Amino acid sequence: MTTFSNSFRKWWRPPRKASERERERSVTFLELFYDLVYVVLIAQLAHALAENVAWDGIAGYAFLFIIVWWAWFNGSSYHDIHGNNDIRTRVFTFLQMFTVAAMAVFARDALGETSVGFALSYAAFQLILTYLWWRTGVHDPAHRPLSRPYSLAFLITTLLFVGSVFVPIPIRIYLWGIAVLISLILPFNTFRQGKKNAFVQEEVDRIIDVSPSLVERFGLLTIIVLGEVVVGTVNGVAEHQHLDWAVGITAVLGMLIAIGLWWVYFDFVSHRKPQPTVGKVAQWFYLHLPMTAGIAAVGAAVFNVVEHSGEPFEGGVRWLLVGSISLILVCVALLMQTIQLPQEQFPLYRRGGMITFVSALLILLLGILNLPTIPILIILVLLMITPIFYGIKVWIQVFGAEEIAIH
């Protein structure tokens, strides 16, 4: 019996203390598997947006994407800070995956006929995270001043989603909105706890020191949503029974947009930790929200562009495309101001941010031009090339200098 008890404790351990967090580790296959479920969920949101690019469709997509992003952010953050390589961590990760998969089932019309199913699926996810965050304080007294208010807010938002199923749709969505607002301001309130107590501040400092593995997770989420641009291009081509040169050129330009977005983010931002202050970490976290939402929206726009290649460029699709790309570039420009850099690289990134921001503004202005599809796409890609070329310059200067230093 003692042997079984010891073996059970070995494989069903309490959550890892924040003070014992692994600073240098690789993203695990369990985390990659967890992210895979979000591929399906985000795809459902993007497909729904592709079917309705009017303002109400865009607003609904943005609202639902915030909910999805918040779920991913908390599940990923919990695993990074408190996860172990044990059965307990796997079981609760798989439970989260079931609820995320259920959200994906109801996501297509989550603000309409399937809203009850989506609300209950999300509430189940929140309930699991409520328990997990609460248990961190039970096993780690130093973390308790942070985990208790965090868990309480999670419980409140869970109850709001559960309660929303008993009221009609307009009120139901308002309750979701209140829950989302509470969720987004929750980290700021948690981090403020350190101002009242020096020991709590030490715990806050541990949390805001973002690990390289969490930085990598944000990069992987970016890859996931970039996949939607590729999927949008491919699905748009597949809608054509007879392919011609217009379809081919439009598809190539759609792929170039995906490549350009990858290039700008991963040259300038990826693999760099945010500066270890509450403000900069919060900016770094939250700027990824509109950026990833914008990338998935580009996938929905590209699908419509390729599907209707050879036809007049519909205004709603045009504005969705240029608006989403502009939003992404603005977020990347702002993210450059939050990351940790050697002093000598500050001027490089300052200029890079300005170039990226100007490109975003010029791309947005394309929305007012009533040009055919292919000319607008060509201009758009050319405008993206400027920050890309500057990113290559930064990449060569920074990584070239590091190579020289190594050898």
Image (cartoon, helix red, strand yellow):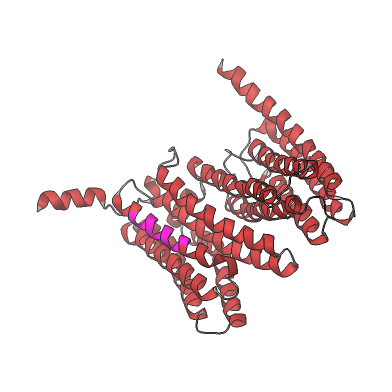
Residue 346's place in the image compared with 314, above or below, is above
Q: Is residue 276 visible?
A: no
Residue 103's place in the image compared with 176, above or below, is above
Q: Which residues are magenta?
A: 91-101
Which residue is more in the foreground, 48 or 141?
A: 48
User: Measuring 57% from the left and 73% from the top, which residue is drawn there?
Assistant: 176
Residue 311: quarter of image: bottom right
* Residue at the outermost right position: 370
User: Measuring 66% from the left and 40% from the top, which residue is drawn there?
Assistant: 262
Residue 390: quarter of image: top right
Left or right side of 115 for 95: left
Residue 272's place in the image compared with 50, above or below, is above
Query: Which quadrant holds the C terminus?
Result: top right
User: Measuring 57% from the left and 57% from the top, which residue is drawn there?
Assistant: 42
Which residue is more in the foreground, 52 or 8?
A: 52
Give yes or no for residue 376 being in the magenta stretch.
Answer: no
Which residue is more in the foreground, 17 or 217?
A: 217
User: Measuring 79% from the left and 61% from the top, which residue is drawn there?
Assistant: 316
Q: Is residue 319 visible?
A: yes
